[in-house]
Amino acid sequence: MMKWLVISCWSLFAIAIVMLLAFTSQENVNRACELPTINIDSSNGHEFIRAKDILQMMKDIGYNYESISLGAVNCKDIEHRILGMTGVANAEVYKSLSGSIKVDIIQRNPICRIWNKNGVNFYLDDKGCAMPITPHYTARVVVVNGHINEPMLKTSVLDPNFGDSLLQSLKLDNIYQLVNHIEQDDFLKAQIVQVYVNKDGEYELVPRVGNHRIMFGKVEDIENKFKKLKVFYEKGIQPEEFNLYDTITLKYKNQIICSKR
């Protein structure tokens, strides 16, 4: 008898919860939409997307939060459109139990800005994907220019098929390998501000401190080349001597060649 009483109580409790949720859900459907709560993760230091951009986009497609009910808001539609905005890596749009719209956005992380020979410029992010420039924000990243013909592609350089057929001659994969290595090293990230691709397809690096040029050569043996450069900076030269050198050449195996002005 006691067992059946317990079961009955739990059943009534479950029914009450379902009815309460149904009532709350219906109430939220008819509730006037409030100003969405927009959370943009800026932990990577970038500001490609702003809350006002999201609000304006919602208004442009008919989701005027001042005159629309919560039930008329299609979260998946808004989410899809946000994912198409420049600088957005991930977005989640949902309705909270309190009846408001929540928007959570994670931004993309560019590692360099590429200028090709046609004057087109775009970012390359840490996932190996190209991303367009935004008019209101400029990321402080390494600039890559010179003899670069490649346009802004939709394919990531990390895609297994990136090097197939017509894509075999592209330099973007080499640029990614080189700049991503710089991005992962605090010293190199602070010192290297520009990468130039010369007519021979070799890479030259421009430092922040010093008037010299670093002749890196082809994108190969990256780790050892940068190891030589760091040893030279730490043990082979004094800070006051940085401007005495014209070039520092890393492209020859097991040696570093420097020329003074």
Image: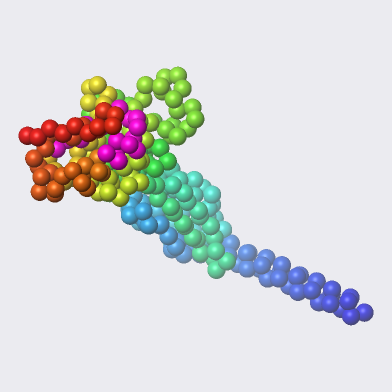
| Residue 98 occupies quadrant | bottom right
Residue extending farthest to the right is: 1
Q: Position of residue 219 (x, y in %)?
A: 33, 30
Is-magenta flag for residue 28? no
One can see residue 176 in this view: no
Q: Nearer the viewer, residue 155 or 261?
A: 261
Residue 94 to residue 10: above or below: above
Quadrant (top left, top right, bottom left, bottom right) of the C terminus: top left
- Going 42% across and 19% down the picture, which residue do you hit? 166
Is 143 above or below relative to 42? above
Quadrant holding the N terminus: bottom right
Q: Which residues are magenta?
A: 212-228
What x and y, as percent, mark residue 24?
A: 63, 68
Q: Could you tell me which residue is drawn at 33 percent across and 36 percent down? A: 224
Residue furthest bottom as drawn: 2
Residue 78: give x, y in percent of width and height: 48, 50
